[in-house]
Amino acid sequence: MHFTMKKILLALTAILILSGFSKEGFGQIPPQIAAGLKTGNAKQVATYFNETVELVILDKENVCSKDQGEMILGDFFKKNKPSDFKITFQGGTDSLYGIGKMQTSGANFRIYFMLKSFANKPLIIQLRIEKDS
């Protein structure tokens, strides 16, 4: 009897742990964000913007709506077409953050972004783009 209870507890623990790591679950950065940054697809990235998002792009700071954020990011991509983007670090528990490097033909950029979970969906609340030295 004790052995059976131990198996049940082990199975329940495994289910709880695995349910916390679903493909779109909070705890990891959705791969679509990195894909959008890599291809310069502002629309794809903006689908993960919160209703208001803080954008800091090359020392220009804006707190804007999701739609305005998409336009601002799209303008940046028109001037700086990405050839590659890789997330170099990610972490956090209550909120997630990622740091990555973007390569363009003109310059390299360091990108920081922070996500919070809203209705079990990770949304970007802050995105910063700086020139990488």
Image (cartoon, grey):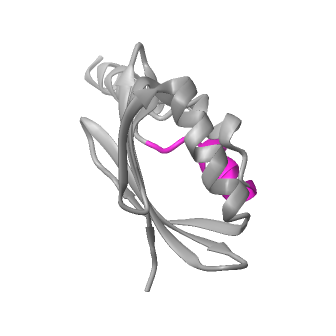
- Residue drawn 52% across the image and 71% down it: 109
Rendered image quadrant of residue 48: top right
Residue 7 appears in view: no
Residue 114 lies in the magenta-colored region: no
Is 93 displayed left or right of 74 in the figure?
A: left
Instruction: Report x, y in % for residue 97.
Output: 35, 50
Dominant secondary structure (helix, strand or loop) of the stretch shown in magenta: helix
Residue 7 horizontal side relative to residue 45, left or right = left
Q: Residue at x 72, y 46 (%)?
A: 41
Quadrant of residue 20 within the rendered picture: top left
Residue, x 33% and y 53% (percent of image)? 91
Of residues 1 and 98, the one drawn nearer to the viewer in this rendering: 98
- Rendered position, 52 above or below 71: above
Question: Taking 105 as reference, is 83 above or below it?
Answer: above
Q: Quick check: is 29 in the magenta stretch?
A: yes
Looking at the rendering, the stretch of residues picked out in magenta corresponds to: 28-39
Numbered disc total: 0
User: What percent of the width, then of the height, locates residue 32?
Assistant: 66, 42
Query: Where does the image place residue 19, in percent across and percent down from the top left?
Result: 47, 25
Instruction: Find the residue positioned furthest to the top.
Output: 119
Can residue 91 be spotted in the picture?
yes
User: In what quadrant of the picture does the C terminus appear?
Assistant: bottom left
Residue 98: x %, y % from top left? 41, 55
Residue located 73% across and 78% down the image: 105
User: Is 76 placed above or below 81 here?
Assistant: above
Q: In which quarter of the image is the N terminus?
A: top left
The answer to whether 94 is drawn above or below residue 50 in the figure is below
Q: In this view, does 2 lie to the left or right of 21?
A: left
Which one is nearer the viewer's eye here, 8 or 31? 31
